[in-house]
Amino acid sequence: MRPFKLIAGVTAAALLPAVGIGWLVETSPGFAQSANVGGAPPFDLADSKVVSEGAQLFRQSCTAYCHGKDGGPSRAPKLRAAKLERTYVYSRITKGSPNGMPGFETTMSRENIWKLVAYVLSLANAEDK
């Protein structure tokens, strides 16, 4: 019975990223995540000007292939109505994901990454159209 458990566990771990729920692996107890990822934001993430600038960056960088317009469902998980932690969003944008999202750490300024974080977090209260 032991080999079956091992095979089932390996199969489940391999399938998680493929079905778009790789975040389960990263939020499991064995995944170390720093509470201070990216340091403190350089501005208020709820500021409407910051959110607006983040929305503009999102439309330029994130909707062409993976995330739908305004964070709706597409090839990647939808961001609308998602309750995400700011450190998780910052880390995901900077480092990317194992299931295909590129990291923007070397191509985008820290300030612009935080603007994207502000926009993504603002989508938590958005409802699908």
Image: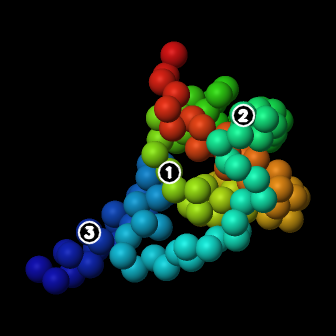
Query: Which residue occupies 67% across, 26% down?
Result: 69
3D distance between C-alphas at marks 1 and 2? 19 Å
Query: What is the crowding at mark 2: few (fewer than 14 residues within 10 Å), some, or many (at least 20)?
Result: few
- Mark in the foreground, 1 or 2: 2
Residue 9 or residue 3, whichever sits in front: 9
Q: Residue 57's image quarter?
A: top right
Q: Residues within 10 Å of mark 1 (few under 14, many from 20)?
A: some
Could you tell me how far apart the alpha carbons at marks 3 and 1 are, in whole angstroms? Answer: 29 Å
In screen coordinates, is 127 left or right of 7? right
Nearest to the observer: residue 129 or residue 15: 129
Residue position marked by numbered label 3 in the rendering: 8
**Badge 1 element:** loop
Distance from Cα at disc 2 to Cα at disc 3? 47 Å
Label 3 sits on a secondary structure element that is helix
Amino acid bearing label 2: Ser
Residue 112 placed where, x, y %?
82, 51
The kind of residue on which mark 3 rests is Ala
Label 3 environment density (alpha carbons within 10 Å; few <14, some 14–19, many ≥20) = few
Identity, as a three-letter code, of the amino acid under mark 1: Leu
Q: Nearer the viewer, mark 3 or mark 1?
A: 1
- Residue plotted at (42% across, 66% down): 27
Q: Residue at x 47, y 67 (%)?
A: 26
Query: Which residue was labeled with disc 2?
Result: 48
Residue at image position (19%, 75%) is 4
Q: Where is mark 1, residue-wise?
A: 84
Q: Quadrant of residue 46?
A: top right
